[in-house]
Image (tube, coloured by chain):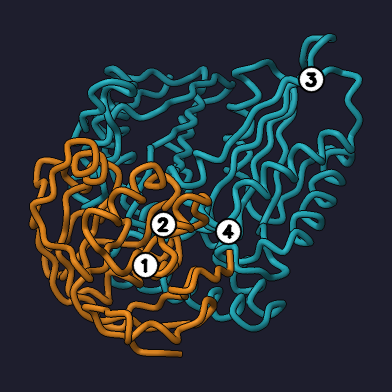
Chain colours: A orange, B cyan
Amino acid sequence: MIHLKTPLNLEKIKNIKAGTQIFLSGTIFSMRDKAHKKMVEENFYPLNLKNQTIFYMGPSPTRPGHKSGSCGPTTSARMDKWTPPFIKKTGIIGIIGKGERCQDVKEAMKGKVIYLLAFGGLGALYAKCVKKSEVVLFKEFGCEAVYKLEVNNMPLIVAQDIKGESIL
Amino acid sequence: MKIIEAKDITNAVKKMCIKAAHELPSDVLLAIKKSQTKQKGIAKHLTALMLENAKIAKTEMYPLCQDTGTAILFVEIGSEIFIKGNITKAINDGVKQGYKEGYLRKSIVKDPLFKRKNTNDNTPAIIHYSFAEGNKLKISLLLKGAGSENKSILKMFAPSASIQDIKDFILSAVRTAGASACPPFVVGIGIGGNFERSAQLAKKALLRKINNFNKNKLYAGLEKDLLKEINKTNIGPQGLGGNISALGVFIEQEPCHTASLPVSVNISCHVSRHIKEVL
């Protein structure tokens, strides 16, 4: 079990092997289908995401008194089509999602991005890890907007390490 | 003749949406608890997290999963009731109110192909009506997320297909579903009917309580065999390996054309959310 804090860098993650359980803390950005489509297909990158970690997630609305709605991962494979150009353009270093990736994405991540699995169907548990949540882009996309999240000890597992070794 | 007001249906559906999104059915929760004792390592740890998630959801009112799904209703209308008002509108109003007041995610887009604009109230619900004797209105609701729904599959077999062919098809569907459909699964299977009916039967099968096997011994035997074989696939919780890949396998069967043998597989994630209410 390793504790990691964002922003990540190659030095922090170079020795973390696929299969390692981690607790992630710090700032992450939610992005899913609509944000990827808009950014990649319209070549529109208003956020500086260099060395940032993104989370494939669209939360449920936040109930009064809560810091976030339910917020577990969505299926990563739906983003496969856009991921290689997205990595190239943004310089992200971490992706949090659910499930397998296609070969092109695995290659694109190798040496550049660590792929972390969040556990599906545990949205309530992940909501409790969120200390702060705000929409920073594409408010009009509703739950598919880009949320900037401050998280504390999010339980994850390394699916593909920086060397390209994978447990999936 | 018993009169049921539309507003009472709306109110019931609203409460059902909120409860289903926050509270795992007791049989599903029990099955997860029992499965924990049979597991070890990461699988056991993940199962403990699933139980913790269920506890947080219920006691602190966070939806079990952020994908609070499509609202799917099976509505059985008794012959001795009179519904005052439009039942379809009453149900959809219940879904609208439940999703708003329960802080549930609205996930329905109006146009499926071109604009994909959110309806912002999670309607329309998908409603299957049936009719029966008696003076009751029975409403069953499923909240079904897309992660598992997207892994569903239908095949029109020839009647010459063997039981093994059918099993292979179902096992292949479950293997393909893998981690992104959030195992351990509840697997709903529809056999017979026709093209669209088999899919509806597979969905209806997901309403069955865990361990409540088919009343027909042959189908019950097939359910038990499939459960054993799915648990040998080593998919495990979250697809990370283990000896529990499904909590239940349920088949619903119906008569079909002599030249047909439709088989549908509808997969539910471990957050198998369904609830029943009788008015």
What chain does mark 3 sit on? B
* Numbered disc 3: secondary structure: strand
Circle 3 sits on which residue?
Answer: B261
Circle 1 sits on which residue?
Answer: A113
Distance from the alpha carbon under mark 4 to that under mark 2: 27 Å
Q: Quadrant of residue B163?
A: top right
Q: Residue at x 89, y 38 (%)?
A: B164
Circle 2 sits on which residue?
Answer: A108
- Specify which label sits upstream in the sequence, 1 or 2: 2
Up the image or down, B189 lies above or below A96; here it is: above
* Numbered disc 2: secondary structure: helix
- Residue B183: mark in rendering: 4
Q: Residue at x 25, y 56 (%)?
A: A59
Q: Position of residue B17 (x, y in %)?
A: 34, 46
* Numbered disc 1: secondary structure: loop
* In the image: residue B85, left or right of residue A109: left
Distance from the alpha carbon under mark 4 to that under mark 1: 26 Å
Distance from the alpha carbon under mark 3 to that under mark 2: 44 Å
- The answer to whether mark 3 and mark 1 are in CB contact below 8 A is no
Q: Amino acid at mark 1?
A: Val
Q: Looking at the rendering, in which quadrant would you find the C terminus of chain B?
A: top left
- The answer to whether mark 1 and mark 2 are in CB contact below 8 A is yes
